[in-house]
Image (spheres, helix red, strand yellow):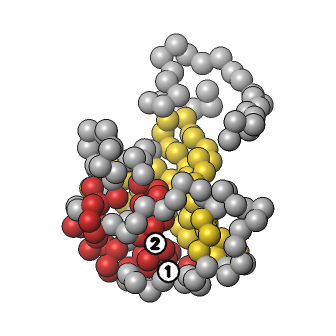
């Protein structure tokens, strides 16, 4: 969207050794699903619209199978350039407020398309097509074919990055 603007709200001096990417100790993402019959208007291109009712509690239970230190090959894009698929996922929570389902993830680092792969798989759990045990089995399979569909990019938000100390 060429007309979108970026505003700088704060700047600070940092050490010459600081690297915005490699100095991060934790990253936080949000994935938004609008779960209702009516198509999106204001939220169009800002969330994933899913018309079929999803069970967010089942999605959350399935998400907990992914928290921890694992080989996330199943949820890794074939285009991922990371040297290792092993990551520690600190948080993967699914909540619902009205029609809005939010998936919040936190970790030091993520693999290419990992959050969108989680969202697509958790949607299957919300549809009743996967159980939490199925999600655990998909993780343990270390096979991209065991993953649900990759969710669309609409709805994915990079929320925050944490750095060591106060910079």
Rendering quarter of residue 80: top left
Percent of width and height locating residue 34: 65, 71
* Position of the N terminus by quadrant: top right
Q: List the residue tagged with mark 1.
A: 126
Rendering quarter of residue 96: bottom right
Percent of width and height locating residue 30: 59, 56
Query: Looking at the image, how many numbered discs can be counted on the residues?
Result: 2
- Residue shown at 47%/58% (left/top)? 116
- Residue shown at 33%/53% (left/top)? 76
Cα gap from disc 2 to disc 1, whole angstroms: 6 Å
Element under disc 2: helix
Q: 59 or 164, which is in the foreground?
A: 59
Q: List the residue tagged with mark 2.
A: 122
For the residues labelled 2 and 1, say whether their Cβ atoms are less than 8 Å apart: yes
- Residue shown at 31%/40% (left/top)? 82
Mark 1: few/some/many CA within 10 Å (<14, 14-19, 20+): many
Compared with 149, 132 (above or below) is: below
Q: Would you say residue 119 is visible in this rendering?
A: yes
* Position of the C terminus by quadrant: top right
Compared with 164, 106 (above or below) is: below
């Amino acid at each position: 969207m060429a007309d979108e603007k970026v505003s700088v709200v704060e700047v600070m001096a940092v050490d010459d050794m600081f690297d915005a990417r490699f100095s991060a100790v934790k990253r936080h993402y949000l994935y938004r699903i609008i779960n209702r019959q009516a198509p999106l208007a204001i939220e169009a291109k800002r969330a994933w619209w899913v018309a079929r009712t999803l069970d967010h509690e089942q999605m959350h239970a399935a998400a907990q199978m992914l928290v921890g230190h694992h080989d996330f090959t199943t949820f890794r894009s074939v285009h991922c350039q990371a040297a290792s698929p092993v990551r520690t996922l600190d948080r993967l929570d699914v909540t619902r407020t009205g029609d809005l389902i939010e998936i919040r993830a936190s970790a030091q680092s993520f693999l290419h398309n990992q959050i969108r792969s989680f969202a697509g798989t958790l949607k299957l759990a919300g549809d009743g097509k996967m159980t939490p045990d199925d999600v655990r089995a998909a993780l343990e399979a270390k096979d991209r074919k065991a993953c649900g569909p990759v969710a669309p990019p609409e709805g994915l938000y990079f929320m925050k990055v944490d750095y060591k100390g106060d910079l």
